[in-house]
Image (cartoon, grey):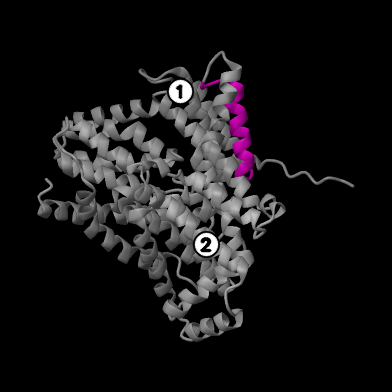
Amino acid sequence: MAIKLVPVKPIPALVSIGLVLLIWFIIPTPEGVSENAWQLLALFVGTIAAIIGKALPIGAVSVVAISLVALTGVTHPGDAKAALGDALSGFSNDLIWLIGISIMCSMSLTKTGLGARIGYFLIALFGKRTIGVAYALAFAETALAPITPSNTARGGGIIHPIMRSIADSFDSKGDTDSRTKIGRYLALVNYNTNPITSAMFITATAPNPLIVSLIYAGTNSEFHLSWGMWAVAAFVPAIISLLVMPWVIYFIYPPEIKKTPNAPTFAKERLKELGPLTLPEVITLGVFLLLLLMWAGVPAMILGDAFSINPTTAAFVGLSILLLTGVLEWDEVLKNKGAWDTIMWFAALVMMASFLGKLGLVSWLAQTVGTGIGSLGLGWILGMLILVLIYVYTHYFFASTTAHITAMFAAFFAAGIALGAPPMLLGLTLAFSSSLMMSLTHYGTGTAPIIFGSGYTTLGEWWKVGFVMSVINLAIWFYIGGAWWKALGYW
């Protein structure tokens, strides 16, 4: 039997290779940057270009990227074994596995029918209009945000399966033409809620406590953000963002199904047809409640820090229970291509972005930017605005908010203070922007690949909405937020 070859797409591949060669061999390495850091940047830019241009499926591009990092030894010149270890280091990142295992666990919602039951229940409450369903999803995640330190677990592991169930109930499937009925819209709302809720509380996403410590250290212990101060500061701009966001996405990509006046009655009828909860549904419901409790840190709250459970460990526990009880079978897990593909490509991007920080290139960039803005002689307001915009939009080069914050926050905070910006205004703006920038890409935080991987949106749709929402959110938090913080006396 003849095998049909499906090789790399030539034009996107040539563009990607051209960018790598341009940065590697033609553009001189800037002073203060190591040669291998500059070479890794070349590989990273080429990888992103190949993904955007769809030279190969994203998992295949990631295999090539891992191969090139190991082969060139850019992270460990002269030590092939260490370079290979660096290239594979992304697979040891617990966030990678939290993403993959969460996708696997969510299979049980569809298999048992519990997801459909939840979807019909929500439709019965909010189903007269699609916008009502969108607000229900947004504020459900908001309620979970204070007690769920993993934004991935919250938006991807808890809310996303419910969103998919609602879309399925309207026969709107990912990776098909039917996605535009309602699934695309709800998926975009599902994701763009996540950056906003992540900004609302210190405990809403893992990097927020790091930001608090960086502000504390950057002001010589003068300013310390308590949990309450952070929450009060975020409240007004966050509520406005949550109210505006569903309508903005509705305007950009309106769902085909807008009014469903008979949906509540239809949903109640379907719930009646489903009958009482089955044992597999009860087990699945119990597992997800257990996951929610573990992800929210309830065992540690009640029993002490000795009983703290890592979110990824919790996800493995949940999947184990589903396998042990027979709700899921291992063959079904193996066939979930989306989960395994996500683990592959997200690991590659996290690895490359991580080493860009470790090799000092990102810190050099931040310091260079601060010095450059200072030399323009601008006032602190314009200087701070430029600084924040550069900080936010360099997130296109990161596959992890933690890596981005670790590499750049302190340098940009110091540069802003040097420009004369009030420390608390600057600190809060950068702090909240560190979550809001998650909207930009399909790899910018752990929630993104889960929702993007469900196939409801194209890459172009995702990036367009992400950019528009980043501009709107920044405007709300910079201007309205800044005025609110002034009224609170924070600066």
Give the structural element (helix, strand or loop) at label 1. Answer: helix
Check residue 60 for magenta coloring: yes
Q: Residues within 10 Å of mark 1 (few under 14, many from 20)?
A: many
Residue at the image point whose x is 16% and y is 30% from the top: 220
Q: Is residue 299 above or below residue 414?
A: below
Give the structural element (helix, strand or loop) at label 2. Answer: helix
Q: Quadrant of the C terminus?
A: top left
Q: Residue furthest front?
A: 303
Check residue 303 for magenta coloring: no
Q: CA distance from mark 2 to mark 1?
A: 48 Å
Q: Quadrant of residue 108 in the image?
A: bottom right
Task: Determine the main secondary structure of the stretch shown in magenta.
Answer: helix
Q: Which residue is mark 2?
A: 286
Numbered mark located on residue 37 in the image: 1
- Amino acid under disc 1: Ala
Q: Quadrant of residue 140 in the image?
A: bottom left
- The magenta stretch is 54-75
- Amino acid under disc 2: Gly
Q: Is residue 453 above or below residue 424?
A: below
Left or right: 186 in relation to 340: left
Residue 242 percent coordinates (x, y): 32, 63
In terms of depth relative to the viewer, which is nearer, 58 or 193? 193
In terms of depth relative to the viewer, which is nearer, 124 or 176? 124
In terms of depth relative to the viewer, which is nearer, 411 or 139? 139
Q: Earlier in the sequence, mark 2 or mark 1?
A: 1
Residue 397 percent coordinates (x, y): 43, 38
Residue 311 percent coordinates (x, y): 46, 46
Front position among marks 2 and 1: 2
